[in-house]
C-alpha cells in the first residue's frame, strides 16, 4: 500500500505533489520521489526514508514544471532504497511511472525486456512498466498505455507522464484505489482523498479496469480498451483527518475493515494453477525442506498468537513437531537447535527487539531462519535467510488486526507449500485448502457486514472490569488474541483459557454475571466445548457463544450467539478473530479511551 499523486496545471507541481504526499504517508513512508516535466525533459528526485529526506534533496536540486507525479512507498518488492523508490523511468527517461499495488508477472516481463537489452536499475516490480512503455511506444501515449496494461497481471493504480506528450497525464486502476481531483484549469490524481482536499472537493472515483486521461482543461474516463465512461463527480465534505482514516473514526476500525484486502493481497502471486508456490521467497531446496526435523515459531504479542495457530496448522499439514515460543523467553532459554531446525520468526514491524534477538540466537546456533513480516527491509527481513512478506500495508493503530490475519494467511501458505513438497497431504486436499483460502476475503466481508449484535454485546461488557475468553484447540489460540485485543485498548482485566483447563482452578473465578466469550467453531471438539460452556453457565456466567453459520445447538447453552461463515476448521481463526477485534474496538469506544494509541504501549517495541 503506497500513495501516488499527480498534478497538471499552471502552478509549480513540486510543492503541490509534496503537500499531497504528506497527506498520504499513512499509506507508506519508507521512501518517496517526484518526477516533473520542466518543459523539455522529465526531472526525477527520489530518496529512501521519510518525505523530509526528499524535501531536503529538493532544496539542493528542485524540479521546476507544471506536470508531475509523486509517490510515497510501502515496499513490497525490493527493500527501501533510493534505487527502489518511485517514480521509475525507462532508460531514455522519456516515461515516468508511479505505482501502488503488486505486478504479479513482473519477473517474466523483466526477463523478456532484459533479453531485448533493457537495463534495470531497481529490484521493484514497477520498473517493468517504464521499460514496457518505451518498448511498446507507438507514437500515442494513451494507446501505448493500453498496450502495456494488457500485459500486466496483478493490482495497480498507475500515474504516468511522458516527455512525448507533456500536455497530459494518464492514470490507470485495477484493484488499487485511484481518484481524479477536478480543479479550475488544473487537475489532480491521487490514491486517496486527503492528498487533494486542499485544492478541490470534486473528484472522480476511477473504477477497476478504467483509465483517465487528464489535461489542464479536462478529464476523460474510459475503460482500458478505450470504451468511453460517463460519470458524475463526487463532492467530498470530509476533513483531512477523517479522510486519512478513509471515513472511519479510527485507524483500528479502518484496518479491521481492510482485512479482506490484506488477506487477498497476501495470497497475490503465491498461488499458481491452484497450488501454493513460495519458491521465490523460500530459498530452501526440496531436500532441505524434506530434511527439516523440527520447527520453532518465535514472536511477541499478537504475532506470537499467530504463531500458536501456526503450530496447529503446520503439525496438522506437514507432520513436523512445532514449538511455539515467546521471543523474550526463547532468547534466554538455550533452546535445542539442530542443523535441521527451522526457526520461523513472526513480526509485523520487523523491529521488535526480543524477536530480533531470538532470530540472532537461532542463527548463531546454526538454524535456518524464515521470517514472516509486514515490513520489507526491516531488521528481521534483512537478517533472516528467507522472508515471507505479509502484504497488509502499513498498520497504524497500536492494536494489531490486519497484520494478524495476514500472518495467518502466510502460515497457511507455508503449511500448504511444505505439505506439497514433503507429500504429507494429497494434491486434492491441498487443492481444497487453496480453494477455501481464496474464499476467505469474501467470507471476511460477510462477517464485517453484520456487526450490530457484536456492537451491542461490546457496549454491555464495557461496564465490566473482568472477563474471560474460552476455547479449545485453534479456538483457544484465537481466544488468546481476542483477550489481548480487549486488554490492550479497554484496560478490562481479561483472561483466555483452554476450556478443558477451567475445572483445574479458574472455574473458581466464575460468578454471577461475569461475562464469558466462548468460541465453539471447531467441529471435532464441539461437544467438549459445549460441556465446558455449560460448566460456566451453571456458575452464573453471562456467555456470548461464537459458532459457525447453521449451528442449531449452541443457543441452548449461552445467552447470545454470534455466527461466522463456515470454512475449513484450520482456516476458521481468520474469521473467528474478527468479531473479537470488533468487541474490543466498540468496548473501547464505549469506555471513551484512545483506540489507536492506548496507554503504556508502542506500535513497535524496539527495546528489551
Ligand atoms: C498487538 O496488538 C500489539 N501491538 C503487540 O502485542 C505486538 O503484536 C507485539 O509488540 C509484536 O509486534 P511485532 O509483530 O511488530 O513484532
Image: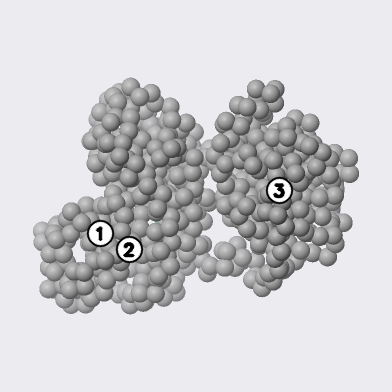
The residue at which mark 1 appears reads as 521
The disc at residue 314 is none
Residue 371 visible in image: no
Q: Residue 57: x and y, percent? A: 75, 41
The C terminus appears in which quarter of the rendering? top left
Could you say which quadrant of the image residue 109 lies in? top right
The residue at which mark 2 appears reads as 564
Q: Specify which label sits upstream in the sequence, 2 or 1.
A: 1
- The vertical placement of 601 against 164, above or below, is below
Alpha carbon distance from label 3 to label 2: 39 Å
Residue 65 placement, left or right of 269? right
Dot 3: element? strand
Alpha carbon distance from label 2 to label 1: 9 Å
Q: Residue at x 26, y 66 (%)?
A: 550
Q: Residue 345: x and y, percent? A: 38, 39
Q: Residue at x 34, y 41 (%)?
A: 431
Q: Callout 2: 10 Å neighbours few (<14), some, many (20+)?
A: many
Q: Specify which label sits upstream in the sequence, 3 or 1.
A: 3
Dot 2: element? strand
Amino acid at each position: 500500500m503506497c500513495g501516488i499523486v499527480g498534478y497538471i496545471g499552471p502552478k509549480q507541481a513540486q510543492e503541490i505533489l509534496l503537500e499531497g504526499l504528506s497527506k498520504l504517508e499513512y499509506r507508506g513512508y519508507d521512501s518517496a520521489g517526484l518526477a516533473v516535466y520542466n518543459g523539455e525533459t522529465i526531472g526525477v528526485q527520489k530518496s529512501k526514508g521519510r518525505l523530509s529526506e526528499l524535501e531536503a534533496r529538493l532544496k539542493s536540486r528542485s524540479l521546476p514544471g507544471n506536470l508531475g507525479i509523486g509517490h510515497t512507498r510501502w515496499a513490497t518488492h525490493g527493500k527501501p532504497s533510493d534505487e527502489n523508490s518511485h517514480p521509475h523511468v525507462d532508460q531514455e527517461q522519456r516515461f515516468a511511472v508511479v505505482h501502488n499495488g503488486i505486478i504479479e508477472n513482473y519477473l517474466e516481463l523483466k526477463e523478456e525486456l532484459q533479453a531485448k537489452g533493457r537495463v534495470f536499475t531497481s529490484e521493484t516490480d514497477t520498473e517493468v512498466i517504464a521499460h514496457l512503455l518505451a518498448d511498446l511506444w507507438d507514437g500515442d501515449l494513451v494507446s501505448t498505455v493500453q498496450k502495456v496494461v494488457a500485459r500486466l497481471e496483478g493490482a495497480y493504480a498507475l500515474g504516468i507522464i511522458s516527455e512525448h506528450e507533456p500536455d497530459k497525464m494518464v492514470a490507470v486502476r485495477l484493484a488499487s484505489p485511484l481518484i481524479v481531483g477536478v480543479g479550475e484549469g488544473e487537475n489532480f490524481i491521487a490514491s486517496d482523498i486527503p492528498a487533494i482536499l486542499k485544492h478541490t472537493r470534486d473528484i472522480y472515483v476511477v473504477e477497476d479496469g478504467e483509465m483517465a486521461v487528464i489535461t489542464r482543461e479536462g478529464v476523460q474516463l474510459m475503460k482500458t480498451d478505450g470504451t468511453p465512461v460517463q460519470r458524475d463527480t463526487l463532492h467530498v465534505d470530509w476533513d483531512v483527518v477523517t479522510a486519512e482514516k478513509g471515513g472511519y473514526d479510527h485507524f483500528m476500525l479502518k484496518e479491521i475493515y481492510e482485512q479482506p484486502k490484506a488477506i487477498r493481497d497476501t495470497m497475490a502471486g503465491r498461488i499458481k494453477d491452484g497450488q501454493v508456490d513460495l519458491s521465490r521467497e523460500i530459498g530452501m531446496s526440496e531436500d532441505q525442506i524434506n530434511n527439516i526435523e523440527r520447527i520453532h515459531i518465535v514472536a511477541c504479542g499478537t504475532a506470537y498468537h499467530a504463531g500458536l495457530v501456526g503450530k496447529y496448522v503446520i503439525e496438522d499439514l506437514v507432520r513436523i513437531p512445532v514449538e511455539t515460543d515467546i521471543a523474550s523467553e526463547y532468547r534466554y532459554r538455550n533452546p535445542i537447535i539442530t542443523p535441521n531446525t527451522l526457526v520461523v520468526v513472526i513480526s509485523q514491524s520487523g523491529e521488535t527487539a526480543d524477536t530480533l534477538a531470538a532470530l540472532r540466537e537461532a542463527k548463531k546456533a546454526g538454524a535456518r531462519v524464515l521470517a514472516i513480516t509486514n515490513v520489507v527491509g526491516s531488521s528481521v527481513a534483512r537478517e533472516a535467510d528467507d522472508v515471507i512478506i505479509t502484504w497488509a500495508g502499513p498498520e497504524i493503530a497500536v492494536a494489531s488486526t490486519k497484520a494478524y490475519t495476514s500472518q495467518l494467511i502466510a502460515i497457511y501458505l507455508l503449511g500448504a507449500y511444505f505439505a506439497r513438497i514433503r507429500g504429507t497431504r494429497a494434491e486434492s486436499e491441498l487443492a481444497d485448502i487453496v480453494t477455501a483460502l481464496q474464499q476467505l476475503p469474501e467470507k471476511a466481508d460477510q462477517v464485517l457486514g453484520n456487526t450490530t449484535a457484536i456492537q451491542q454485546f461490546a457496549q454491555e461488557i464495557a461496564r465490566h472490569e473482568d472477563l474471560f475468553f474460552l476455547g479449545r484447540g485453534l479456538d483457544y489460540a484465537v481466544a488468546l488474541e481476542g483477550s489481548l485485543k480487549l486488554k490492550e485498548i479497554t484496560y478490562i482485566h481479561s483472561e483466555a483459557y483452554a476450556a478443558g483447563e477451567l475445572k483445574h482452578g479458574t472455574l473458581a473465578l466464575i460468578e454471577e454475571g461475569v461475562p464469558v466469550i466462548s468460541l465453539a467453531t471447531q467441529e471435532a471438539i464441539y461437544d467438549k466445548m459445549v460441556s465446558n460452556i455449560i460448566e460456566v453457565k451453571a456458575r452464573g456466567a453471562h456467555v456470548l457463544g461464537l459458532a459457525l453459520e447453521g449451528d442449531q445447538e449452541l443457543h441452548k447453552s449461552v445467552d447470545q450467539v454470534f455466527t461466522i461463515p463456515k470454512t475449513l476448521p484450520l482456516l476458521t481463526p481468520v474469521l473467528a478473530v474478527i468479531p473479537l477485534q470488533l468487541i474490543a474496538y466498540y468496548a473501547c469506544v464505549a469506555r471513551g479511551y484512545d483506540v489507536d494509541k492506548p496507554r503504556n504501549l508502542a506500535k513497535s517495541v524496539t527495546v528489551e
